[in-house]
Image: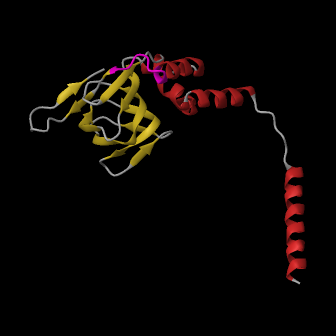
């Protein structure tokens, strides 16, 4: 009896599989969807192209060129703090007067306690970081910090790359208790 039951179950599984396969609709990807998929394979940061383009206020085409150039290693310079590298970018009209760029930190790199002197907005493009306030941001997450909002963070095990629009700079706390160091673009 068991063999007959097993054959029945197998026949039902095949029938269900055939029905599901027949129900599949083959859809041709849109040109934009196909281009985005192919670009993401070439440069994984492009997965967040829409958020990045909106943040820095440029067209998707300009944003993609910016990300491709940076991902290829072009234009990175030592940042204002040890273990921090940056790429300075020219954002659009909405970012006038702000420091616009990309920030890269290696695994476990620490961004020390600091306070924002103006609004800061970011989009994480790769990796992630753990904020000392107890939350974590990973690739695809966005965050806005308000004036006077203090924090510090540690890059995750894969490091972190994020896009930033920073207004007015930051005041980095002096660990020895001296006056804070103001860092502007």
How many dots with numbers?
Answer: 0
Would you identify the image quadrant in which residue 161 lies? Answer: top left
What main secondary structure does the magenta stretch of the protein show?
loop
Residue 66 image position (x, y, % from top left) = 50, 19
Seen at 89% across and 56% down, the residue is 18
- Observer able to see residue 99: no
- Observer able to see residue 32: yes
Instruction: Indicate yes or no whether the magenta region holds residue 49.
Output: no
Would you identify the image quadrant in which residue 5 lies? Answer: bottom right
The quadrant of the picture occupied by the N terminus is bottom right
Looking at the picture, tell me which residue is in the foreground, 32 or 142.
32
Residue 122 image position (x, y, % from top left) = 42, 33
- Extreme-bottom residue of the structure: 1
Seen at 85% across and 81% down, the residue is 2
Instruction: Indicate yes or no whether the magenta region holds residue 73.
Output: yes
In the visual, does 132 lie left or right of 65? left
Give the residues drawn in magenta, as a range: 70-77
Q: Is residue 119 above or below residue 136?
A: above
Residue 165 image position (x, y, % from top left) = 40, 26
Seen at 85% across and 55% down, the residue is 20
In the visual, does 48 lie left or right of 82? right
The quadrant of the picture occupied by the C terminus is top left
- The colour scheme used to paint the residues is secondary structure
Q: Is residue 56 above or below residue 151?
A: above
Seen at 38% across and 30% down, the residue is 104
Q: Is residue 23 above or below residue 92?
A: below
Residue 163 image position (x, y, % from top left) = 43, 29
């Amino acid at each position: 009896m068991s063999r007959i039951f097993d054959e029945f179950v197998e026949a039902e599984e095949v029938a269900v599989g055939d029905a599901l396969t027949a129900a599949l609709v083959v859809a041709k990807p849109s040109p934009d969807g196909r281009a985005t998929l192919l670009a993401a394979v070439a440069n994984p940061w492009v997965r967040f192209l829409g958020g990045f383009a909106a943040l820095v206020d440029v067209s998707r085409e300009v944003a993609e060129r910016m990300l491709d150039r940076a991902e290829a290693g072009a234009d990175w310079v030592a940042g204002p703090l040890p273990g921090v590298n940056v790429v300075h970018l020219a954002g659009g009209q909405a970012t006038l007067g702000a420091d616009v760029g990309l920030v890269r930190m290696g695994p476990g790199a620490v961004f020390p306690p600091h306070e924002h002197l103006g609004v800061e907005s970011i989009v994480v493009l790769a990796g992630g970081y753990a904020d000392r306030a107890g939350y974590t941001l990973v690739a695809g997450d966005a965050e806005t910090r308000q004036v006077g909002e203090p924090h510090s963070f540690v890059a995750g095990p894969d490091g972190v790359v994020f896009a930033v629009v920073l207004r007015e700079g930051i005041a980095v706390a002096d660990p020895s208790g001296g006056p804070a160091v103001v860092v502007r673009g």
